[in-house]
Image: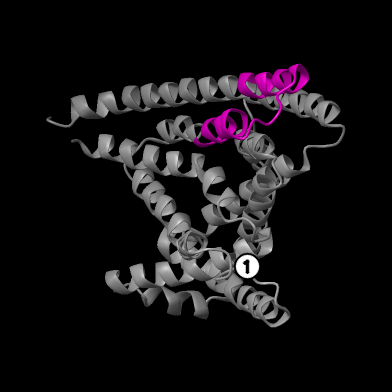
Amino acid sequence: MSNERRGYLYGLTAYVMWGFFPIYFKLLRPSPPLEILAHRVIWSVTFVALVLTVMRNWKFLGRVLRTPRLLGGISAAALLIGVNWATYIYGVNSSRVVETALGYFITPLFVVLLGVTVQREHLRSWQWIAVGVGGVAVAILAVDYGRLPYIALALAASFGSYSLIKKRMSLPPAEGLFVESAVLALPALGYLSWLNLTGGAQFGHVSALHTVLMLFSGVATAVPLLLFAAAANRVPLVGLGILQYVAPILQLACGILIYHEPMPAARLAGFGLVWLALIIFTADGIRSARTGARTRSEAAAPEATAAPA
């Protein structure tokens, strides 16, 4: 198997795992979202620490601690991913799986807006059209829901902003996840201690399966991230961009087919416009990548011809 095909396999596995997260987090009830989040943080730290110990890769920690700007960026990323995880768990366990799927469908469009507002990037005309169609879709869905789809918007905003900070820091995935989870670990431990003192903790009091699933929430968090990192090193950016839609498609299927969440005509129309925006966005990205590759190839051709002389 070629390196690129292996990368696609890693990426597809990661996105399929993320796609079935609604089933996993539904199984963690009756624990409330904050208890699930706290355990997810604690067991993520534990699992990634074991991975880093096996890899004998702790040197990065000194660099992080000696660089206040890097530590500040990681703390901001930790806050954003904590908000993202908490919102997702709340959405799934309040029977809004379809809305959580919408959040990850519109995330690429939100990232484009961040590129314009924060990175001062210039959008191509088709990208503006995709963003405009996405805005119309959100407006239609707001009318259908009778409110803004705040879970979807919170997921897109938190993950999009998290992605921007991560891109600027360029920390490897395992190391980044460890430090981010470690930043959240102290408040998570404090919250779990308070739950146990007040008798509100569900962990260890529901069933053996529930306890095991809570313990494995760290593994479920870390493994797809590590697989995604392995894919990112092997797969072209356009390929990763197409793969990213696997997860919300599966999450949407879970919401409709497994949990029988409603999909009235107006909501379906809104989702249809989101998909249209993503098709425009993806097609433009593929066209731009091909044009760039062709330009680089043509620019390199004279140099290649002259080299033997």
* Residue 115 image position (x, y, % from top left): 64, 41
Question: On the image, which quarter does residue 47 sit in?
Answer: bottom left
In the picture shown, does residue 35 fall above or below 199?
above
Looking at the image, the residue that sits furthest to the bottom is 197
Looking at the image, the residue that sits furthest to the left is 308
* Residue 45 image position (x, y, % from top left): 48, 70
Q: Which residues are magenta?
A: 247-276
Residue plotted at (37% across, 21% down) = 294
In the picture shown, does residue 154 fall above or below 263?
below
Residue plotted at (37% across, 35% down) = 236
Where does the N terminus fall, quadrant-wise?
top left
**Closest to the observer, 245 or 254:** 254
Where does the C terminus fall, quadrant-wise?
top left
* Residue 218 image position (x, y, % from top left): 47, 62
In the picture shown, does residue 169 fall above or below 241?
below
Residue 176 in view: no
* Residue 19 image position (x, y, % from top left): 50, 39
Residue 73 in view: yes
Q: Is residue 34 magenta?
A: no
Amino acid type of the residue that numbered disc 1 sits on in the rendered structure = Gln
Secondary structure mainly formed by the magenta segment: helix
Q: Is residue 262 magenta?
A: yes
**Closest to the observer, 35 or 45:** 35
Q: Circle 1 is placed at which residue position?
A: 202
